[in-house]
Image (tube, rainbow, N blue to C red):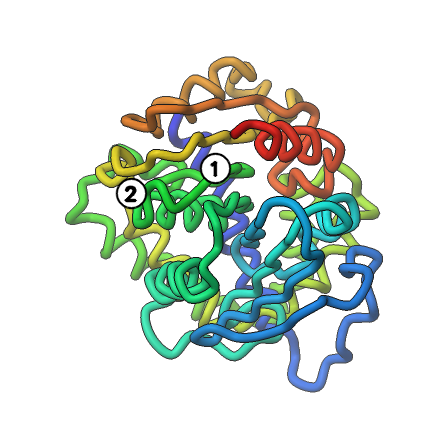
């Protein structure tokens, strides 16, 4: 496994997503997307700037946490399949999908809001499902709350940013500041091409879906995405993983044409992800192929099957 390869895959998401917010002032709002969540939530409320929308009222409680610069649209297929039989709490983090930005530390603020959701609503060992940064948040919350969490399903989300796992802790703030400075200096007219190139080349398999997804990232605030990104680059949750008591499942996207130039096999990628999750007592790391980063878009059935297995396991 070459960490530089993983970093090359991961950084375009960090760099491209904030560019969406650099669109020219006065640009038309994106048209309604085919990825919009269908139906009306049964309940809608906020916790410290985090929007929570509840769908369904049966079965187990499931918290759906989106990734960087994403919104509820990431979970539209999960909501359609599971809301009739489970209770789904669909989150939008501060600064994402049109929400006002965070008033304090981005990642730790979201982490605290998630703790408040579980405790104030007295959720009964909820299942945490997170995509990308949302998976990192799910792992953090599972470490914070121990046996109050029922299970974790992380879709390509890890406790440390891919490619930075060997970085000296003292270098993390410097790296984060450097990337944020590059973002701030990116000219607005670079946005469109880079956004589409990332989604077409690394985000999803289908070019048409990539082009439909690109306008959705326009909704996220540039400063907020940069703040979360800086926090992620400075973060390493591995020392906290021993506090997790819930079973953890991590889905690993794999697309052979993307990995062939580095001779990276699915098994090697799975092994590397597993190595980044030490001290997790009950861990499953499973490849999903063919798929890129947005697993719910590329392989909705595989995600649904994995979630059903998690829900069925007590």
Residue 111 point in image, percent of width and height:
37, 59
List the single residue furthest toward the bottom: 26
Which label belongs to residue 151?
1
Residue 209 point in image, percent of width and height:
79, 48
Question: In the visual, does 273 lie left or right of 58?
Answer: left
Question: In the visual, does 2 lie left or right of 84?
Answer: left
Viewer-proximal residue among 174 and 161: 161
Mark 1 neighbour class, 10 Å CA radius: few under 14, some 14 to 19, many 20 or more: many
Whether residue 136 can be seen here: yes
Question: In the visual, does 179 lie left or right of 218?
Answer: left
Q: In the image, is residue 236 above or below residue 314?
A: below
Tell me which residue sits at (77%, 44%) in the image.
81
Label 2 – label 1 distance at C-alpha: 17 Å
Tell me which residue sits at (30%, 49%) in the image.
144
Q: Nearer the viewer, mark 2 or mark 1?
A: 1
Question: Which residue is the site of mark 2?
Answer: 237
Q: In the image, is residue 223 above or below residue 114?
A: below
Name the image quarter holding residue 16. Answer: bottom right
Tell me which residue sits at (74%, 37%) in the image.
300
Q: In the image, is residue 184 above or below residue 209?
A: below
Name the image quarter holding residue 226. Answer: bottom left
Is the N terminus in the top left, top right, bottom left or bottom right quadrant? top left
Mark 2 neighbour class, 10 Å CA radius: few under 14, some 14 to 19, many 20 or more: some
Element at badge 1?
A: strand
Name the image quarter holding residue 59. Answer: top right
Element at badge 2?
A: loop
Residue 174 point in image, percent of width and height:
23, 56
Which label belongs to residue 178?
none
């Amino acid at each position: 496994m070459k960490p530089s390869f993983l970093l090359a895959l991961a950084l375009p998401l960090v760099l491209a997503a904030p560019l969406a917010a650099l669109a020219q002032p006065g640009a038309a709002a994106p048209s309604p997307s085919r990825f919009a969540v269908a139906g009306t939530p049964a309940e809608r409320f906020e916790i410290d700037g985090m929007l929570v929308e509840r769908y369904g009222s049966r079965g187990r409680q499931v918290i759906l946490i989106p990734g960087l610069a994403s919104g509820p649209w990431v979970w539209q297929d999960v909501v359609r399949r599971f809301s009739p039989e489970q209770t789904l709490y669909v989150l939008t983090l501060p600064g994402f999908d049109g929400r006002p930005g965070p008033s304090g530390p981005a990642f730790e603020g979201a982490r605290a809001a998630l703790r408040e959701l579980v405790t104030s609503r007295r959720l009964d060992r909820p299942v945490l499902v997170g995509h990308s940064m949302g998976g990192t948040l799910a792992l953090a919350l599972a470490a914070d709350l121990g046996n109050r969490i029922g299970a974790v399903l992380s879709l390509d989300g890890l406790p440390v940013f891919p490619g930075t796992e060997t970085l000296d802790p003292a270098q993390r703030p410097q790296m984060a500041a450097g990337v944020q400075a590059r973002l701030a200096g990116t000219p607005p007219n670079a946005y469109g091409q880079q956004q589409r190139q990332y989604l077409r080349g690394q985000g999803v398999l289908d070019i048409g879906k990539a082009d439909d997804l690109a306008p959705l990232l326009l909704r996220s605030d540039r400063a907020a995405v940069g703040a979360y990104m800086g926090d992620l680059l400075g973060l390493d949750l591995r020392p906290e993983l021993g506090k997790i008591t819930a079973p953890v499942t991590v889905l690993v996207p794999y697309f052979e044409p993307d990995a062939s130039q580095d001779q990276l096999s699915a098994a090697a990628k799975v092994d590397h992800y597993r190595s980044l999750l030490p001290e997790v007592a009950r861990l499953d790391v499973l490849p999903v192929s063919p798929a890129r980063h947005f697993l719910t878009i590329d392989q909705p059935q595989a995600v649904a099957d994995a979630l059903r297995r998690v829900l069925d396991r007590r």
